[in-house]
Amino acid sequence: MVTQSLFPYYAESLREVSGIEVLDIDGAAMMHFNNVGTEQAHELKYPHRIDALIMLFCVRGEISFSSHMNDYTLKENQFFFSSASVFQFYSIANSEFYAVAFTSDFLSSMNFDVRFVAQLEAHLRGRATISTVTDDEKEKISRFFTTIYKGYSGERSEYMELSIRHIFCSIIYRISDAILEEKMTMSCSGVKERSSEYFERLMGLLSEHYREQRNVEFYAEKMHISAKHLSRVIRNFTGKSVHQWIDEFVALEIKNLLKYSNMSIQQISYSLNFPNPSFMGQYFKRITGMTPGEYKKS
C-alpha cells in the first residue's frame, strides 16, 4: 500500500536530495534536514499547504520560514508548533532540524487521550508557539528521532510499521509536554483568550461527567452561561461542536475498555450509562464507523 505523504512536494521532489531524509506513515510524516546546501535549499522556497499539525525542531544553526502568512526564525534548541498552514521556508542552509506533521485522525487511530488532544488543539488554535528547551532536553528528544531514522529505514513489515507509529506517538507526547509546560512556552500571539478559558473549563467538566452527562445544557449550566453561547464559543474556537467533544470523550473510553479491560460489551454499555448494548453500538458506529465488536477484533 502506498502511503500518501503529508509533505507531498518534499517527499516526491526532495527524497533523493543530499541532506534530506523523509519518513512517511499513514497520518504522520517526518523529515530530517542536515547541512542542506544553498542550491538545494533554494528548491524549498516555494509555499506549500500542509494539512496537519506541524512541529519544527531546530537542533543546530538557524532557520527562517513563514506559516499562516507570519514570518518566524527558529534557533538552536527551539521548537515551532502550529496547526495546518501554508508553509514556506526562506533560509535553512547549514542547519539541522526536524519537521514532523500529523493529523487529528492519526491521534485518534492511536487512541491518544482526548484530553491531551483537546489541550493541544486549544493551545494551537489560531496561533503558533515557539518553545525553548535546555541542551539536556534537546539531547533526550533527539534520541527519539535518531531511533526512527537509524532503525526503520528501508522496507518495513507490518509490525515494524506499528512500532514506528508508537515511536511517533512518543515523540508527539514528549515534545508536546515540553511545549505545554507554562514555564517553557512563549506564545507568539500573546494574551490568553476568553474562549480558551471556556474551552479548558469545558474539558475539565467533561473529564468529570462524560460518563453520565451528554447534553450541552448540563455543561452550560455548570458554567453559568447559555447552551447557545457555549456552543457558539466552542465551535468558533476549536472548529468542533460541544456534542463532538462529548462524543470523542465517550468513544475513547469505549475504545480503551474494549481493548484494555476484561469487561463485556454489555458491561461497558452499562458502565457508561447507555440504556442497552445495542444503543451503545449504534452510538459507537456513528462516531467511529465500526461496531464495538469490529473494533475489539481490529
Image (cartoon, grey):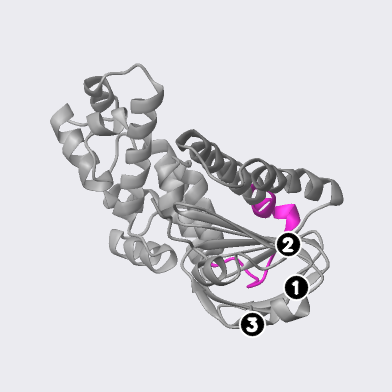
Let me know if residue 3 is in the magenta part.
no
Nearer-the-camera pick, 109 or 214 = 109
Circle 3: element type? loop
Please state if 45 lies on the left or on the right of 136 as rendered: left
- Identify the residue under disc 3: 45
Q: Which mark sits nearer the N-terminus, 3 or 1?
A: 3
Label 3 with label 1: CB-CB less than 8 Å: no
Label 2 with label 1: CB-CB less than 8 Å: yes
Let me know if residue 179 is in the magenta part.
yes
- Residue located 74% across and 74% down the image: 92
Position in image of residue 120 (x %, y %) = 54, 54
- Identify the residue under disc 2: 97
Position in image of residue 253 (x %, y %) = 37, 34
- Rounded to the nearest whole Å, what is the CA distance between mark 2 and mark 3? 16 Å
Label 2 with label 3: CB-CB less than 8 Å: no
Q: Which residues are magenta?
A: 177-193
Q: Residues within 10 Å of mark 1 (few under 14, many from 20)?
A: many
- Residue located 55% across and 67% down the image: 193
Q: Is residue 88 visible?
A: yes
